[in-house]
Image (cartoon, coloured by chain):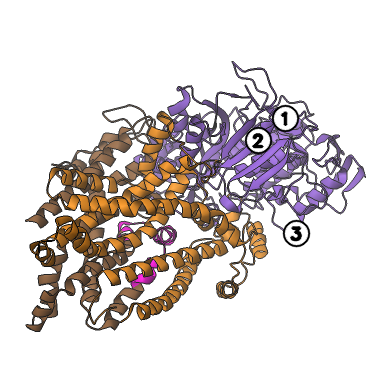
Amino acid sequence: MLLAVPLVIAVVGPWFVGEVERGRAFVDRGVLGTDFVGRDVLELVLGGGRSVVGIALVATGVSYAVGVPLALVAAMARRRWLDEVVMRPLDVVLAVPSLLVLILVAGIAPRGYGTVVVVVAVVTVPDLVRVVRAAALEVASRPALEAMRLQGETRRRLAFGYVVPAVAPTLVADLGVRITTSLYLVASAGFLGVGVAPDAADWAVMVDRNQAGLFLIPSAVVVPALLIIAWSVGVNLVFDRAVRR
Amino acid sequence: MSDPFPTLRRRGFLALAGGLALAGCASSPGQSAPRSGGRVRAAFAGGGAKEVLDPHMASLFVEAARSKALYDKLADFGDDLTPVPRLAEKWESNADATVWRVSLRQATFHDGRPVRAADVLSSYARILDPKRAFRAKASLAVIDLTASREVDDRTVEFVLTRPYVEFPNALATFSAYIIPESTEDFARPVGSGPFSFSSFTPGRSTVVKRYADYWDGAAKLDELEFVLANEESARVNALLAGQVEYAHDLSPVTARAHEAGGRVRILRSPNSGIQAFAMKVDRPPFDNRDLREAMFLLADRPQLVESVLSGSGQVANDLYGKGYRHYADDIPQRARDLDKARFLIKRAGADGLKVALNTSEAATGFVEAATVLADQARQAGITLDVTVGDKDTFWSDTLKNGSLSSFRSGAMPIESHLSQRLLSKSTTNVTKWARPEFDALYDKAVSTVDAGVRDSVYQEMQRTLHAEGGYLVWGFADWVVGTSPSVDGVGTAPANTLGWARFDRVWLR
Amino acid sequence: MTLGRYASRRVALGLVQVLVVLVAVFLLVEALPGDAAVALAGDNPDPARVAAIRASMGLDQSAVERFVGWLGGLVTGDLGTSLVSGRPVVDFIAGGLPTTLLLAGVTLLLLVPSSVLLGVFVARRAGRGVDRVVTAATIGLHAVPEFALAIVLVALFGVTLGWLPPTALGADPLADPLVLVLPVIVLLARPLCAITRLVRAAMIDALASDYVRHARRLGLSRSRVDYRHALPNALAPAVQQLARTTDWLLGGVIVVEAVFVIPGLGTALVDAVAGRDMPVVQGLAVLFGVTTVLVNLAADLLAFRLAPRAGTAA
């Protein structure tokens, strides 16, 4: 249910959006009032889910596709140099404050969804690798793994057949956090002028840009914020349930 | 986040013989009788720890307000941007306006020394130092320093390099403050202003106290503290919670949200912020006059004012400086005419044109206005691709690059606007408007002593700009300031004029 | 490998990392459009004036010359002076550091015990109602950006109810600790959610593991098994996340400092980047880089102790 409402709005909503009309900013007009440039909040809510949901998923997916294999390689490496080769460059990236990265990339990179995905990945991957590696390290040192290795299981099968399932709860807990972080970064990126257009119909952007009118038209902030929260909580609960099975 | 580019502008204009009702004394209904004592904390946006006390380096609003508390200029601008004598008691020129004799008031610096002609010449020499880059330099460059001299302790004779009737504008120019002769150390600034220096913590606060011997009457407040808060929401929250008594530069939305609550008093200064788009007339596509006119006609100004300024402003007529001296009031207001705009677009061969509209967060409302205009242009068949650039370098970028950009300006005399932005040799000519006949009109205006004739020349220049200029001026934004209900005497003059941020006239109930 | 050898290797590596960070930050800031002169000229970008400012700042030297000169100063302990105000960079750091340290310190001090306790608490009740409520709340809160949370809290407690000061404007946080309450809550919210969830997941995992079951069978008391045997293993990922939190704190600090008007290092960094004040940006990057490297180092050492890897240890 929590997941369904935002998802349905995100997928179906854009079909119901008509021509943009403008009036005064932050006045009580229509169902939910108007936003910071005088547009109807309801229409924006309907049209604004696709990009939030989409970018967050793609960005998180990219981060995982890059991060998890790296972490496994590092954790299960029998030779130390391999672990070092993976981890040290990431440590360097880690040592640059992520907000500084965002501020600077905002100044340099072209605006676009691709940039957001890359920024989210750059900010998340080092972090993800450390967390997954730490969890996998614990699994990899278990006697059971040693035993299986002695029985001649291949490294890849060990990694995906044993280690990944074993660290899955940590991964899923992290995934939930990570998706919400991506959402959050998409909003921040919009604020810094990297991602989507500043007046885009996008829930995250709406929360940011309409805050000035919090006292006048609270719905312009609260409705998209609640949708984002519902979406994050919903995703996490679904993952939790999937793991428990 | 921060707003490091306030619309501070410089320069001055015509001295009509003296007497001008000053803002700052403008009374509002229910005002209490002036009373002495107390301390006011005023919240401004600031530049962080990099801010400086050198008044000649001022560029942020907080620096301007602080300089105004600590220092004086020879002149300052009245509400209609006419120069008003300050440290100068009066000025007079020779017949062709090339030599100006300025008499100083009997005023003293905070350390008790009198303000002398030598201090004035030394201050201007510092600003004009070729090795430095002070903001007021361009405006004062008309002075021939080697030929200028002190006649006596309280009289200066300025010799100019060309006839310049509007020389008092230069005396009132932004940041042209008078400092004691040969000052270079501003750790403990000494000026002649209504407040003297107490303490300064970069990026946090500046405290000043009343100077009892101020020539224009001692301030009412005992003490005044400038504190810095870059976020507008923080300034208004601090005001609501009683942490400050004055919050500078609030948004119209904030004003609407809190005006009725009775916890704060909202003051609006009309005609303060000029909101525009700048088209470059020297390159395609806007080198085409029809297309420029189409842009003028496709803009829905009332909608822009409603959406972007939240109704807190007035519709503009593609001209700078409504309410200022020499403003061409008799040119009819332009209204939206989509059919004519489409016709002109077709005639210009610009059907389906796609052009970048450069904007940034350099000023409040820029991005919003750009997106609204893009919507309006789409209805006329033109695609404006809103491109949000770097806010820190926006002004420099748009001076050189692109063909259409967001623009805004604070108050300055119309003559200054013309000379800085619309002449062939202007240094900040964003629209690249460069016409010898227009330059000639300007030269004629500033060398014409007869006020009526001069005014008609200004009218002619504005008619040309209205018909085919590069500035699409769509609105005049109110400047919004909030105070605690206990504060009285805050004026509603446009920002950058004498009546703005004039804390020597403020008192606590 | 012994802890000592591991530590010394990592410290050497840390130095290299800091150097790489400095070069990276320098290149990134150089790559930003404009320079300090353009930023200072602001809305009056008269080309002649910009050129004069540039010359007076020494920006007419090449980038390499400036970087090498700055690096030379760094070796002798001189961080240089601000291009814009001419004040020493050390002043900027000394001005902002106590405030930021206080803010981050208080947050971390509250974060560690509360998130671990909460995580263990719900892990031991996994699947029950209280677990579900806490889980939903932590995810929900984690999705709220700092600025949004700050605005809501300020509007509610600072302005409408008037219980707490909405900003730290003009106040000294040391003398008036009340001004820190709202900022710390905002800073605490997201890391608290993240770490609680990680602790919970890892703890559930550990509780289900063979050795915990074995220990239970041996008749050890439940809390002894949980806290002495399961918890240390469950903490390894959380420790890594905690290390990252320090970095997140910096990001949060920038937002929180802006909303609550706390003049700390975050504000100094944003202002310096906006002003293209390279020496100040670099000075702050040194500080942040060293801090991050140290914290990650500490986290690695701790993880090394919590879950040492036989033979192949990194």
Q: Quadrant of the C terminus of chain B?
A: top right
Q: Main secondary structure of the magenta part?
A: helix
The answer to the question of whether label 1 and label 2 lie on touching residues, with beta carbons closer than 8 A, is yes
Q: Quadrant of residue C170?
A: top right
The chain letter for the residue carrying disc 2 is B
Q: Which residue is mark 2?
A: B224
In terms of depth relative to the viewer, which is nearer, B324 or A204?
A: A204
Q: CA distance from mark 2 to mark 3?
A: 35 Å
Q: Please name the color used to draw chain A.
A: brown
Residue C32, position as x, y percentages in the image: 48, 62
- Which residue occupies the foreground of this view, C59 or B333? C59
Query: Is residue B457 shown left or right of residue A196?
Result: right
> In terms of secondary structure, where does tag 2 sit?
strand
Q: Which chain is orange?
A: C
Dot 3: what SS? loop
Crowdedness near tag 3: few (<14), some (14–19) or many (≥20) residues, C-alpha within 10 Å: few
- The residue that appears at 50% across and 55% down in the rendered structure is C265
Q: Which residue is mark 1?
A: B219
